[in-house]
Amino acid sequence: MSEHEHTAHGAGAPDDADPALVADGVVDLLGFLAYASLVAFFRLADDASLAASLPDKADLAAMAVAQFGHFKLLRSRISELGSDPQQAMAPFVEAIDAFHARTAPSTWLEGLVKAYVGDGIAADFYRLIAQLLDQRTRSLVETVLADSGRAEFAIARVREAIAADPAVAGRLALWARRLVGEALSQAQRVAAERETLARLLAGRSAAQLGEIGRMFATITDAHAQRMAALGLAE
């Protein structure tokens, strides 16, 4: 059995699903995350250049390097599955670029909130999908969606800014609410428009779909926790 076929028949694959469609769904998910990681690398590198202090520049540069490492892991896994990484990423370039164009931060603090809140809720959604896949793919997705230090960095800087100017909190809370709406819309749109990803969700049993509903509730709870950690009201 080939690696591609093995993934399709992994522990996470539904018994009644077309193995080829499941395997294609895996490649789609990895392609999406690969391009997202590449874009995150560029964004963090840009943020590092704009940071006011040398320690902040170094911290953000380290996070950028971690994102590029995630990109390489995903690219390698896509190749192992017998697919071309460039072709796997191509269908998602427009959606990801459009999301970032719609949510371009106007200040350093907005960029930090976007990295923590907006990216965080999108990552939660893709972890949700990964739970439906084979163990190896699930482990890889969890690795590349790991925090890599951004949460602690963003929380510290945002809280410092609010302590210095409490009025900042209201503006950032509004920005965070906008980001959440955009992030959820993007995630759901991608899952719906890519037939292979949609089938990964739709091909599950009623019990599993009920678990997905609970996962969405967990995403909402995680968002509330992120807002509280930043010192922002929902």
Image (cartoon, grey):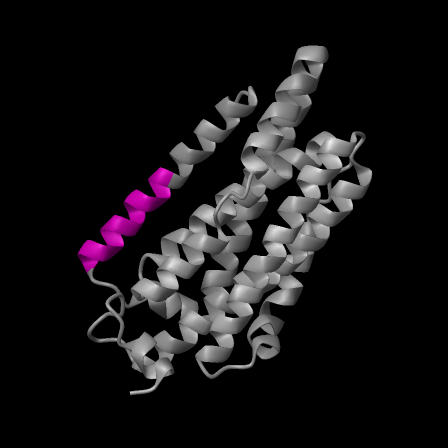
**Left or right: 20 in relation to 32:** left
Residue occupying the point 43% across, 58% down: 141
Q: In this view, does 128 lie above or below 229?
A: below
Q: Nearer the viewer, residue 182 or 73?
A: 73
* 210 magenta-colored: yes
Considering only vertical position in the picture, is 166 above or below 144? above
Among the 4 quarters of the image, the one containing residue 130: bottom left
Q: Residue at x 58, y 59 (%)?
A: 69
Q: Give the range drawn in magenta.
A: 206-218
- Of residue 181 and residue 229, the one placed in the foreground of this image is 229
Q: Is residue 149 magenta?
A: no
Q: Position of residue 144 (x, y in %)?
A: 49, 55
Q: Which residue is drawn at 72% across and 33% down?
A: 56
Give the vertical position of 156 relative to 11 (above or below): above
Most common SS among magenta residues: helix
Residue at the spot x=37%, y=81% of the render? Answer: 4
The front one of 232 and 198 is 232
